[in-house]
Image: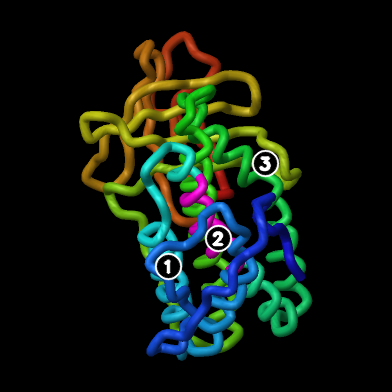
Amino acid sequence: MSYEDANTNVGEADDISSTGDDGTNLTSTEEIDIWADNSELIKSQVADIVNNSESLQDELADVGELADWYIDKGSLDTQAEMTQTSLWPYVVWDTELNNLWSRMSDELDATTKEEVLSEQRRWVSLKEKAANLATIENEGGSIRPMLVNIDLEEYTINRCYKLADIYAKTLNESFTIPEKESGDLYGVYIDDEGTGEIYSSLVVNTGYEGDYDITIELYRLCELTGKGTLNANNEIDFESYDGKVKGVVSCTNNGASFIVSEATDSVVYPEEFYDFELAF
């Protein structure tokens, strides 16, 4: 079952594929035609990776190399070219996501399959909204479409690793999801209350001085914006710009949370806990 293909709306792909030493289908030219529709070529390349990988861990690593290859062989001379080039790594990972699910769906037990399918539908319905939240500061700018593509690629990478982790258990394979480190706690985390719509959101962006810019929207009632600094527990100490709210933000590959430690003249109160179960 396929969830959602990338909406490329570009021309037909050229037949420029060849097979590398490791069996992976790679293009034979120094650069790809970024304006052509490379989606069928990517499907072939991803299929070759799947067929030649000894484990899911190796498979995802090789898909990552393929995504990087599209950036290396793309064109980065103008903003329009950078934006179009940034589309193809996202398509690579989106193709891997669909490929993973088509294999998983035949092997998962009925209960697990329904749980994964339900969460995946919510994820698909929210991923573009999450990317728009992450890039809202660039609204109207020519760079924003590129940033959206980059974020969508990152979200899809995260999702692929999560699905692969579930699939690996079915296959009795060893599999590791890379943990978030101190430099990559940024992201968009959403509580949709199981609906596929945003009820609460936590947006963590990297700041200019090694800190974090944080926006927390809670149940559509209030918005908290402020700065965050990394603490010794690899969590983020948050303080709102108006100084009325302090708390701790915890981010993982499976979601995030915010606990209020101090609040003055605010709609939130100390010790309140907010959970954002969908990570992008």
Q: CA distance from mark 3 to mark 2?
A: 17 Å
Which colour scheme appears in the figure?
Answer: rainbow
Residue identifier under label 3: 192
Sort mark 2 into few (<14), some (14-19) or many (20+) by Cα contacts within 10 Å.
many
Residue, x 52% and y 24% (percent of image)? 139
Q: Nearer the viewer, residue 30 or 242?
A: 30
* Vertical position of residue 151 compared to residue 200: above or below: below
Mark nearest the camera among 3 and 1 is: 1
Disc 1 crowd rating (10 Å Cα; few below 14, some 14-19, many 20+) is some
Name the element at disc 1.
helix
Residue 92 colored in magenta in the image: yes
For the residues labelled 3 and 1, say whether their Cβ atoms are less than 8 Å apart. Answer: no
Tell me if residue 123 can be seen. no
Numbered disc in front, either 1 or 2: 1
Which residue appears at 27% of the width and 49% of the height?
182
Say whether residue 77 is left or right of residue 26. Answer: left
Chain part drawn in magenta: 84-96
The residue to which callout 2 is attached is 159
Question: Is residue 219 depicted above or below 70 in this figure?
Answer: above
Residue type (three-letter) at the residue carrying disc 3 = Asp
Q: Amino acid at mark 1?
A: Gly
* Percent of width and height locating residue 209: 21, 30
Mark 3 crowdedness (10 Å alpha carbons): few <14, some 14-19, many ≥20:
some
What's the mark number on residue 64?
1
